[in-house]
Image (spheres, helix red, strand yellow):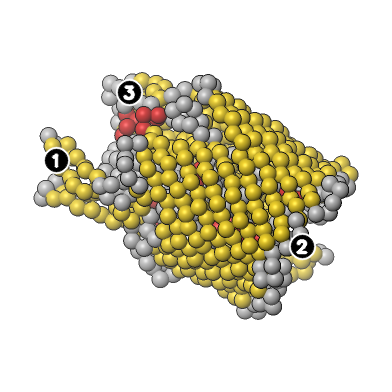
Amino acid sequence: MPPSIGLYFLCICALLLAGIDGVAAEPADSAAYHLNEVSVTASGQSSVKLLDGGDMRFNTSALAFGSRSMGEIDVVNSVKHIAGVNTVGDYGAGLMVDGAESSQTVYRIDRVPVFFPYRFGGIFSTFNTPHFRAVHFSRNIHDASFPARLGARFDFEAHNHASGFEGLVNVGLLSSSATLKLPFFKRFSAIVSGRISYVDQIYGPWLRKKETDLFYDFNDFNVTLNYEVDEDNVIYLNWFRSNDHLRYDDSNYVLGTSLRWKNDLLSVHWRHVGPVTSHHRLYVSRFSNKLNLSMPQFYMDVPSSIGMYGLAGDINVADVGSERVSLSSGYEVNGYDAALQSVDISGLGREYAGAGHGNDRALEIRTYAGLDCELSSLLNLKAGLSCSGFLNSDGYKVFSIDPRLTLSWRPSFGLLSLHLGKYRQFLHQVGFSETGMSSDFWLTANYKAPAQTSYSAVVNYSRSLAGTGMALSVEAYWRRVLGQPEYNGQILDLLDVNYDAYKYLIEGDGHNLGLFLILRKDAGLLNFTLSGGFGVARRRYAGLDRWIRGRTDPGFSFNADVGVRLDSHWDLGAVFALASGRPYTPARAMYVIAGNLITEYGDLNSARFPTYHRLDLSATWHVDQKAAGRIIRHLVNFTLINAYGHRNVELRKQVVDIASGTFGVKEVASLYRFLPSLGYTIQF
């Protein structure tokens, strides 16, 4: 088992060298949601509820009975089991939902954004799932409160209060985590979570080979402090930090590569419940990254970061003189400080510092207002406006009025919803990584990279299948995207003494459209989620007179997540995924001119990797034990990843045999094959 883990990490780290080795670069508050649950009955704990409009709500405690990733419970990986939610492969980090870029999806802890919540290689996210009470996932239908993003939304809801001492400890193959709920006084409590890794300590001998050396370490921490002022008012504080450090040395290239990245979040909240419900918060969220490359007599340092500082609030009135009408409103004031990717180089006679662009600062002010009106017993209208003002330090400014409207008709056979909306995004994330690594950097909208805009139309049909415990959601979406930037440079471009990230940005327009279906059974001994879909993402860039496939093009997908409760101690599960291979730009010809290898590429994203498919199997044994007047639950989970060992292709690279003068293409397959995952959890 340890050698398999070592090979897995060696393979994902080899992706760092792809740019050097000739690989083509891929140029709320619950009261505010107003969503009714389609499925409301369940036997035992339900891990996920399918909501009106295709949204999903995850019960984090129930996820312990399902499959895990390297022994860890992770809600972000659970969402990967839904059709239309894609990564760039087994090792990909960011999620691309219905053809949207990963940076267009927002992740929030109690409505405060986290910029890069990913571990290297996509093993699991930086969110310690047991710290949160629930997670709300919405795809394409959003009201006016939705922040300035174009894609989907993950809302992680921290526990409001710890009424008694409780805890959960999880031990996995790569890391261990713990969550404690601590009631200090009658009205004051704390929830503390932490995760530490021991990759190097346990697997170091297998990760260090004759010609390569790998070190990977990570940790994350959450603290939530709650003070109940009275039955209507709660003041609480959230603190979150994650740290990742990856180092890879290869004696073949005499090259050392290091990546460090971290997230920091601190927020203070005041929540009031009554006829007028409100949630106000003051916060700071920051992400920073540093890429280092070193060779004998040569060193390159490539840092980047983004910080967000803000004040926001939501105010909801449930009764404005009529039980059929409710109002919602809110505000945001956000300041941004982005340090774009810059380059410091020393050695080989190329000493220079700070090549690139300096800090990028901006101010965003947004207000919104929404109306939720029951027009009749069958017809509901949700309408709202989001008004944004944005000013960049270079003088670029935007004022945007973004209307949102959702009309829902609820006959006896289900709920049919039509959504129309306009959305703006003032943040961009770009970079040369094909797998969404932390080296991809953030920048704010400016004259060189204007704000992104999308217009969307969505039709959703949802219904509960009475007497079966099943719920169905079918959705068709169309989104017109304007001003989406992409980075078409490579890692070697960083060696340019006049390096400027903006020189490698291309701006594209396009559209995403598709259809997906989700069938969820949420009652009885057999639970499942079946989903299937098909989508396209098309883009057009300046100087290109035709539409091309976007790198986020989802293609077709089918996913099945099945769980069976055998008895009071055993749960079995299976997750099957089938999807189109990801798009890539193929090499068309290769030449050697004056001793230099020249590669000629075909049309951008014109080819696909082979069809992706994988089956994961899991078994969970659990038993309850009474001790000292409380119930202690023990769980042991075993998951076999890619149980039938299909060799899914992760990348194709061009190889040269100097001796014979021949060229070829080598496929590198994922090492997620027959990979065991073991985890032990104790809950008290």
Mark sitting earlier along the chain (1/2): 2
Residue at 36%, 63% (x, y): give it: 611
Residue at 36%, 29% (x, y): give it: 503
Q: Is residue 55 above or below residue 113?
A: below
What is the CA distance from the residue labelled 1 to the residue labelled 2? 73 Å
Which residue corresponds to mark 3?
497
Is residue 178 at all visible to an observer of this figure? no
Disc ID at residue 352: none
Q: Could you tell me which quadrant the C terminus lies in?
A: bottom right
- Assign a secondary structure to mark 2: loop
- Assign a secondary structure to mark 3: loop
Disc 3 residue type?
A: Val
Which residue corresponds to mark 1?
592
Q: Residue 654, image x and y in percent?
A: 24, 49
Q: Residue 582, image x and y in percent?
A: 38, 55
Q: Is residue 557 left or right of residue 38?
A: left
**Toward the viewer: 372 or 195?**
372
Which residue corresponds to mark 2?
377
| Quadrant assignment, res 377 | bottom right
Disc 2 residue type?
A: Ser
Residue at 79%, 51% (x, y): give it: 325
